[in-house]
Image (cartoon, helix red, strand yellow):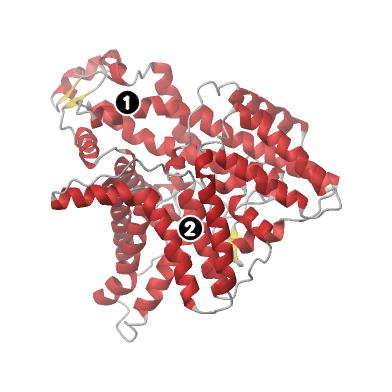
Amino acid sequence: MLFNSYIFILAFLPITLCIYYLLKQSKYKTYDLAWLVLASFVFFSWWNPNLTFLLAFSVLFNFAISRFASNGRSRFWLVLGIVVNLSLLGYFKYANFFVSVVNDTSGTNWHLEEIILPIGLSFFTFQQIAYLVDVHFRVKRENSLVRYALFVTFFPQLIAGPIVHHADMMPQFGKYFRSRLILMNLAVGISIFSVGLAKKVLIADAIAPLVTPVFTAASLGTPISFFEAWSAVTLYPLQLYFDFSGYSDMALGIARMFGIVLPANFNSPFKATNIAEFWQRWHISLTRFLLDYVYEPIAARLTGRVIGWPRDSIRRFIIALAVPTFITFFLSGLWHGAGWTFIIFGFLHGGYVILFLAWRQLRGRQASAHTLIAKFPGWLLTMTAVMVAFVFFRAESVASALVILGAICGSNGISLPVSFLPYAIEYSDFLAAFGIIFEGVSPNDLIGLTKMRLLGVLCIIPVCLAMPNTLQIFSRFTPALIARYGRPYVNISSQSSWLNITWRPTLFWAVATGICLAFAISHLSTVTEFIYFQF
């Protein structure tokens, strides 16, 4: 079941909300939680009922293991839990890729039947691994199976995150809300949901027709023109951002309707002026998971081996910073998908971050520039690097990614749409001297980029750079968790926007939200899945 579908918006969500609050007012304290667990399983099974047993097994197995692995007991149970979780993830997500690699390298012809990847498997697997590690190191264990099942299966974050932690979530369940607070939660939640739905339906889905044909053509070996390639490479990061951040906003809004605040997952990543800052703003819950459970344990172990070495030595930098960073981003790329394109995506970002850390160490951690002009080179370099990496993230194969990257470098010539010629007729000879012509494969034949469509697309970039994000718009009403265990990982106060827009429970905002929601719902005729569902 998709958030951007009529069945969810008009039936599943209202029914679930009504029954939840009716049960919450009853004398049976756990019935409301049990109802959410049941609703979450229905939500998960809507896509493929045959895979519901996998989610149920994962919940029961990890709940049982946590009772043996808690409070620093034998590491055997912790290791067993992690191995079983990763084995399930490995089989469903990576078995076919592993077999194809073996066949390519050894010349064998092994074959596996098609394995259906359960949606959300990567998310609830990582979530439960984090829980097992936490309870082993004496974080409070959950003793109620119903509450634990709700922690794992809570449907707003079940399919595509954000990745949540038990200590953040469970204190919020079971709280009693007065009528006034219920109404406020519903108002805030519906408003955030409307923003997320608009991002997905009105922006991400509108960009998709300008991106998909280009990557499809590249995979089929069709020549890609310079303009088409640049259009796809520039627009895909925007499509992915509005798609995934739209989902995250919808998840925040739906959870808030139930009185639950989920962790923040995005914080204007396209405003980042370096690659490290980009990952502090992009998919924040995954970044925090990888830092807490992959990078920091590896870095701590390796740092112990370089104690006494000069801080500015190359060997210390490689062992204590570069190696754990590279491993972390390699696993991040592999987590995103089973394929060489995702591995290269992880390698590229790992290399970007290592180069940035080396540069920062060489310049002695000087204070960053604060003026817009001084920040621009860093922003431009960061966005260029991100766009190149996202080509591999989106492409169906390494070969098709190289086709597109070659096209943006002019391998098929530098041609612009013929329809642009009237606007540059006076400079056509000058442009031709540099190899820029107005012929060849026209984008109108491939992506149908009309003048109005081009204008609409160009308006999206200022939206990313000038508009406040969801966290800022709803900052007065705690739209998301921005800290864990007292450690802040989202700094909203330091962010700036050219426009200052703050949501308030007023008639104006009620009308604006209603119009936004109605307009988005009216565009649901072509329902599309969220990009991150495949992960």
For residue 420, side relative to residue 105 (left or right)? right
**Quadrant housing the N terminus:** top right
For residue 346, side relative to residue 511 (left or right)? left
Identity of the residue drawn at 62% across and 32% down = 8
Instruction: Please state which amino acid type lies under the numbered disc 2.
Output: Phe
Q: Position of residue 457 (x, y in %)?
A: 43, 27
Quadrant of the rendered structure where residue 279 is?
A: bottom left
Front residue of 48/477: it is 48
- Asked if residue 474 shows in the view, the reply is no
Q: Position of residue 55 (x, y in %)?
A: 54, 50
Judged from the image, the secondary structure of the residue bearing numbered disc 2 is helix
Judged from the image, the secondary structure of the residue bearing numbered disc 1 is helix
Instruction: Please state which amino acid type lies under the numbered disc 1.
Output: Pro
Above or below for 329 versus 271: below
Quadrant of the rendered structure where residue 38 is?
A: top right
For residue 17, side relative to residue 97 (left or right)? right
Quadrant of the rendered structure where residue 501 is?
A: top right
Q: Residues within 10 Å of mark 2 (few under 14, many from 20)?
A: many
Nearer-N-terminus badge (2/1): 2
Identity of the residue drawn at 19% across and 48% down = 103
Above or below for 472 versus 46: below
Q: Position of residue 170 (x, y in %)?
A: 67, 59
For residue 213, the mark is 1
- Residue that carries the numbered disc 2 in the rendered image: 126
For residue 355, side relative to residue 336 (left or right)? left
User: Distance from label 2 to label 1 (Cα)?
Assistant: 33 Å
Front residue of 457/372: it is 457
Front residue of 408/521: it is 521
